[in-house]
Image (spheres, rainbow, N blue to C red):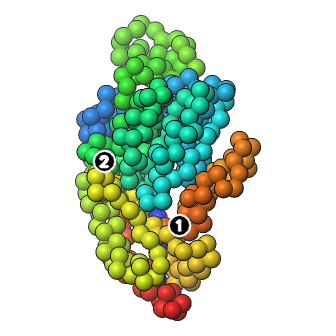
Amino acid sequence: MTQIPFSRPFTVGKEFQYIQQTIENMDLSGDGAITHKCHQLLEESLGVPKILLTTSCTHALEMAALLLNIKPGDEVIVPSFTFVSTVNAFVLRGAKPVFIDIRPDTLNLNEEKLESLITPRTQAIIPVHYAGVACEMDAILDIAKGDNLAVIEDNAHGLFARYKGKYLGTMGCLGTQSFHETKNFTCGEGGALLINDPQYIERAEIIREKGTNRSRFYRGQVDKYSWMDIGSSYLPSGILAAFLYAQLEAREQIQHKRQRIWEYYYRNLRDRATQWGIRLPVVPEYCEQAYHMFYILLPSYEERKALISHFKERGISSVFHYLPLHLSKMGQDFGGKEGDCPVTESVSDRLLRLPFYNSLTEADQRRVIAAMEEFYAARS
């Protein structure tokens, strides 16, 4: 029996061609010609003043924390239902994470709880666009503006998705992207910082180049470069950029495939969902999603565990997602306790992600759905 993995890396055709060209041109280190082609494609597609590739979304978030001058004693508001990088980037600068619960529909940061968590020490709000479906950015931005807070969008899941016509990642002062192998567009490990407020551009280049103004030197703007600020090495190699450029060029093809997969799941599970007592993803009509994943919410932790086991016996890999950060060891060190984020705690126990990758076939999806039918038939 052929195994159906949860995720599988993919190529679209020109990755090896561009990598070969990059090697022949000896464009191996960061910020060469192929990197700038990625920058230009993303900037023009998204309408962003400046985009810088990074070695990961984690590093893009760390750059954001540096650009905002986050320091010990500051607070940042982050959803408990996210990957640890969203929090670590700011904790590394000495900030205290203030965990906010999520909405029960989109599983995004619950904007209605924001104002009660803002204190004189709050510096930033970090909305995470879960599954590539937009947070309620109008409300978040209004609250942030009223309290003079920065908004950094963690858009690891949502490249090319939109909220009321605006691309995710382009509405806060900064946005971050991921090109990890599980994402819609990949180079194995990689990320990008979207700089929507031009005041951050020059310093972002310095931070990304180990605290030096080497970018200005390469452009001929200064005759030598030197140490200007704190920073680190956040540049991906030209080989990674070459792989990524091929993927970005094929963005419409990739998104069309992922839309087909997502809609097949939704169409074939929609009528069964009520009968089985499960819930499918919610996408508001004003959100154009990224088709990053397809998840279901089961009634209980026990049922999820049983369904994962049932899938595994039939050669199908399915996985849960984030554990509540406020209940982790580090989260509890920052004062998190059970009951702080009840929706997060409930969703974390019940969410299950179905196999989802670009080469997933309808035959494979039929196997997944047939396995679910078998599982629920046995329980009725």
Question: Residue 278, percent across and down?
Answer: 47, 75
Q: Give whichever of discs 2 and 1 has the lower sequence position.
A: 2
Kindly identify which residue carries mark 2: 162
Q: On the rendered structure, is 191 left or right of 313? A: left
Is residue 106 in sight in this rendering? yes
Q: Which one is nearer the viewer's eye here, 46 or 251?
A: 46
Note whether 315 is above or below 57 in the view shown. below
Residue 86 visible? no
Residue 260 is situated, as x and y percent measured from the top left of the image, at 29, 67
Give the amino acid type for the residue marked by disc 1 in the picture.
Answer: Leu
Decide which of 146, 291 is in the foreground and name it: 146
Q: How many marks?
A: 2
Between the residue at mark 2 and the residue at mark 1, the CA separation in whole angstroms equals 24 Å
Residue 32, horizontal then vertical, whole percent: 38, 30
Tell me if residue 114 comes above or below residue 101 in the rendering: above
Q: Residues within 10 Å of mark 2 (few under 14, many from 20)?
A: many
Element marked by disc 1: strand
Q: How far from the left and from the top, in percent, is residue 336?
A: 69, 47
> Could you classify mark 1 by the number of other residues whose Cα lies within 10 Å: few (under 14), some (14-19), or many (20 or more)?
many
Q: Residue at x 49, y 87 (%)?
A: 376
* Circle number at residue 147: none
Tell me the amino acid under the disc marked 2: Arg
The residue sitting at 35% across, 12% down in the picture is 220
Rendered residue at 66%/56% (across/down): 339
Q: Secondary structure at mark 2?
A: strand
Disc 1: which residue: 351
